[in-house]
Image (cartoon, helix red, strand yellow):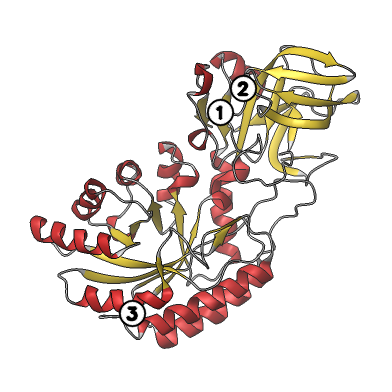
């Protein structure tokens, strides 16, 4: 494998280069893009598989790994991971169908989301998966659906904890949240759950995502386990599932460094001991999405024009925020930062320039790279945006201005 050095980001590892051209899955991207005729997301399945192996080797064997399908629901990727991890987490009825079609075991599929429709809850009950309830309304509907289907719905309680994952890219716990049930309300909800014909499975406690600080992750994990142990005192039956979320980040921006796993391993070993002593039937589970797939994906588009405006070079491409909202800086960034970007068919070129990469849309928001040092590019060259395997095409406004769709290839 080749390490692709950049002046502005952490080195990109795992991909090969053939005569100056980036390869994904062993195939040259210029050939792949020419064959498609449109921008493409290229996913290297070997890098996804290797990430699973790395996690298995770096974390305690007692920790179960789940893949959060929302990060990338491409059926081939879900099928690949369904065979490699211990469970799947879904966020819609369509994701339930994807998980089931991929061979996911219903015993180890869970369904989260703050606005589940009754039809989605019915699909979860019929599939036999666990529903992470996020309101009393969901609990009551599930009980009714179970009676209608003559089954006992499997339920976990998603808890909004009284703390956040510090320095996380996106906070999803603590304070007032649309996610989960406030921790102080959970005992009352558990009391009601005990009165209904449903099966209690455990807790889902997720406090934040995209974190590169092991100390912050370890602290959140400790607080999460302690909270679960306290809440388990009110549970109508033993806790069998303890999903403590994920939050493992990947380096996207200048100054980012890869997450160090050794401190997390040591912390989880201690927590596994605690859980086994107090909640002996519980499976301690990490729910990861981005960390499995982000670094295995590259978004590639073609330069269709080169412009110089008052001294600034603009490379205009046939792709943009309608395919890759996150890289444009409009998906959770407060201050826009550049993703790792290069000219895929000119890697290693000595002639460089400062240029901005923009898309074809009629908005200044359509920006893939802002004044980056790049190999000098001309129309026909290929722009590659790394770290694009998670929250890419399905997290973007694909219908905006009605340009052609990007394709996805798992290689």
Res 262 visible = no
Secondary structure type for disc 3: helix
For the residues bearing labels 1 and 2, Cβ distance under 8 angstroms: yes
Disc on res. 319 = 2
Residue 154, above or below 396: below
Residue 204, above or below 2: below
Q: Would residue 95 appear left or right of 123 to someone viewing this image?
A: right
Of tags 2 and 3, the one toward the viewer is 3
Foreground residue, 345 or 190?
Answer: 190
Foreground residue, 161 or 338?
Answer: 161
Disc on res. 246 = none
- The 10 Å Cα crowd at callout 2, few under 14, some 14 to 19, many 20 or more, is many
Residue 265, given in percent of the width and then of the height, sits at 61, 71
Disc on res. 187 = 3
Q: Where does the C terminus fall, quadrant-wise? A: top right
Disc on res. 323 = 1
- The 10 Å Cα crowd at callout 1, few under 14, some 14 to 19, many 20 or more, is many
Instruction: Give the residue at x 59% y 34%.
Output: 325
Secondary structure type for disc 1: loop
Residue 120, given in percent of the width and then of the height, sits at 26, 48
Foreground residue, 297 or 310?
Answer: 310
Spatial CA span between label 1 and label 2: 7 Å
**Quadrant of residue 262 within the rendered picture:** bottom right
**Quadrant of residue 138 within the rendered picture:** bottom left
């Amino acid at each position: 494998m080749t390490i692709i050095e950049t002046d502005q980001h952490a080195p990109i590892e795992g991909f090969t280069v053939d005569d100056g051209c980036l390869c994904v899955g062993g195939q040259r991207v210029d050939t792949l893009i020419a064959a498609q005729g449109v921008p493409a997301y290229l996913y290297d399945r070997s890098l996804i598989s290797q990430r699973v192996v790395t996690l298995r080797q770096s974390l305690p064997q007692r920790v179960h790994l789940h893949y959060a399908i929302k990060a990338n629901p491409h059926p081939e990727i879900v099928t690949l991971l369904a065979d490699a991890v211990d469970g799947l987490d879904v966020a819609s009825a369509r994701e339930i169908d994807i998980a089931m079609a991929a061979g996911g075991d219903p015993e180890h599929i869970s369904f989260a989301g703050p606005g589940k429709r009754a039809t989605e809850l019915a699909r979860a009950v019929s599939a036999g998966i666990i529903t992470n309830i996020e309101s009393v309304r969901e609990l009551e509907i599930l009980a009714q659906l179970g009676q209608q289907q003559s089954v006992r719905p499997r339920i976990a309680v998603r808890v909004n904890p009284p703390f956040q994952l510090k320095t996380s890219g996106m906070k999803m716990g603590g304070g007032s949240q649309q996610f989960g049930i406030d921790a102080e309300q959970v005992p009352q909800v558990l009391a009601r759950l005990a009165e209904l014909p449903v099966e209690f499975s455990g807790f889902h406690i997720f406090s934040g995502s995209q974190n590169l600080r092991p100390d912050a992750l370890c602290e959140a994990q400790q607080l999460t386990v302690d909270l679960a142990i306290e809440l388990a005192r009110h549970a109508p039956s033993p806790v069998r599932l303890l999903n403590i979320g994920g939050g493992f980040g990947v380096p996207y921006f200048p100054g980012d460094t890869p997450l160090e796993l050794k401190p997390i391993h040591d912390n989880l070993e201690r927590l596994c001991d605690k859980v086994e002593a107090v909640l002996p039937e519980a499976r301690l589970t990490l729910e990861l999405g981005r960390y499995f797939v982000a670094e295995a994906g590259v978004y590639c588009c073609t330069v269709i024009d080169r412009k110089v405006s008052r001294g600034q070079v603009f490379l205009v491409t046939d792709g943009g925020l309608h395919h890759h909202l996150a890289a444009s800086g409009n998906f959770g960034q407060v201050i826009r930062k550049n993703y790792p970007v290069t000219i895929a068919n000119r890697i290693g070129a000595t002639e460089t320039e400062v240029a901005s990469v923009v898309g074809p849309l009629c908005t200044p928001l359509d920006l893939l790279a802002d004044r980056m040092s790049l190999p000098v590019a001309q129309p026909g060259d290929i722009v590659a945006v790394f770290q694009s395997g998670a929250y890419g095409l399905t997290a973007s406004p694909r219908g905006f201005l009605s340009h052609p769709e990007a394709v996805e290839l798992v290689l």
